[in-house]
Amino acid sequence: MLRIVTALLLSLGLATGVAAAEEHTRFAVDTHYKVLDVPGSVDDPSKVEVREFFSYGCPHCYSLEPAVDAWLEEKPDYIDYVRTPVLFLRNAEPLARAYYVEDALGLVDEMHVPLFDAIHKHREPLFNESALANFFRKYGVEPAEFSKLYGSFGVSTKIRQADALSKKYQIPGVPNFVVNGKYLVKRENVKSNEELFKVIEFLVNKEKTGS
């Protein structure tokens, strides 16, 4: 009887080890993710950062947003999720400035999805300062306040930093994700949104455990 129990325990241990090995090799460097040549700093070193590069004008970013929202509701507290608007798309800078105005006013949670909806669902041409100022007015932000923030030193500094970071990380397109300033997800090799977030979680765990 003891031999049988021992054999079962050994087989269970072997199976667990195989499963762990399969999980470790499931996502491969240079296939599912790239190790960045020059690591970047993170906003909160006490957490594992997941940084999304996006643009309000990007239809693919808009399509992914429901999956992002669902994942954010379930993510553990040790993940710091950061959004970074890119500037390399057409009409990207006004929309990037709009994001940082939202951020400065604490309105990202309230305005992020509606701004996406306005552009892609309702086809509103929110690609310049005056059009965006009118949109922000719906959320209690007067045009004068919006314009002051839109052209402010603080927002302009964040725009320059965002552009520099997307160049440093060599972001090929949006939406895209960098984990802890070290790993760029290779979106072109990810088969689904579900797999995308599994790759992100794999990299987060890699950073958290130091494996």
Image (cartoon, helix red, strand yellow):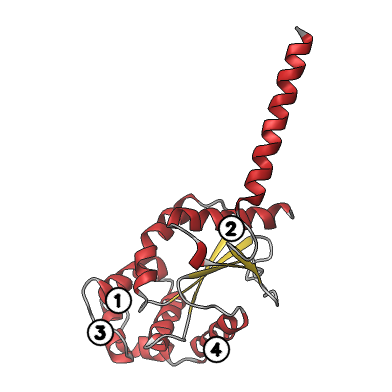
Q: Earlier in the sequence, mark 1 or mark 4?
A: 1
Question: Identity of the amino acid at label 4?
Answer: Arg
Query: In the drawing, does residue 63 fall left or right of residue 195?
Result: left
Question: Identity of the amino acid at label 3?
Answer: Pro
Question: Identity of the amino acid at label 1?
Answer: Gly
Distance, label 1 to label 3, CA atoms, is 20 Å
> Where is mark 4, residue-wise?
160
Rate crowding at label 2 as few (under 14), some (14 to 19) or many (20 or more) other CA atoms within 10 Å: some
Residue at horizontal 63%, vertical 58%? 28
Q: Earlier in the sequence, mark 2 or mark 4?
A: 2
Q: Earlier in the sequence, mark 4 or mark 3?
A: 3
Using the image, determine if residue 158 lies above or below residue 17: below
Instruction: Pick the residue in front: 200 or 192.
Output: 192
Query: In the drawing, does residue 82 fall left or right of residue 133?
Result: right
Distance, label 1 to label 2, CA atoms, is 31 Å
Question: Identity of the amino acid at label 2?
Answer: Ile
Residue at horizontal 75%, vertical 24%? 10
> Where is mark 2, residue-wise?
79
Using the image, determine if residue 140 lies above or below residue 196: below
Using the image, determine if residue 159 lies above or below residue 207: below
Rendered-image quadrant of the N terminus: top right
Circles 2 and 3, Cβ within 8 Å, touching? The answer is no
User: How many numbered dots are placed on residues in this image?
Assistant: 4
Element carrying mark 3: loop
Circles 1 and 2, Cβ within 8 Å, touching? The answer is no
Circles 2 and 4, Cβ within 8 Å, touching? The answer is no
Q: Earlier in the sequence, mark 2 or mark 3?
A: 2
Q: Nearer the viewer, mark 1 or mark 2?
A: 2
> Where is mark 3, residue-wise?
125
Distance, label 1 to label 4, CA atoms, is 27 Å
Q: Quadrant of residue 103?
A: bottom left
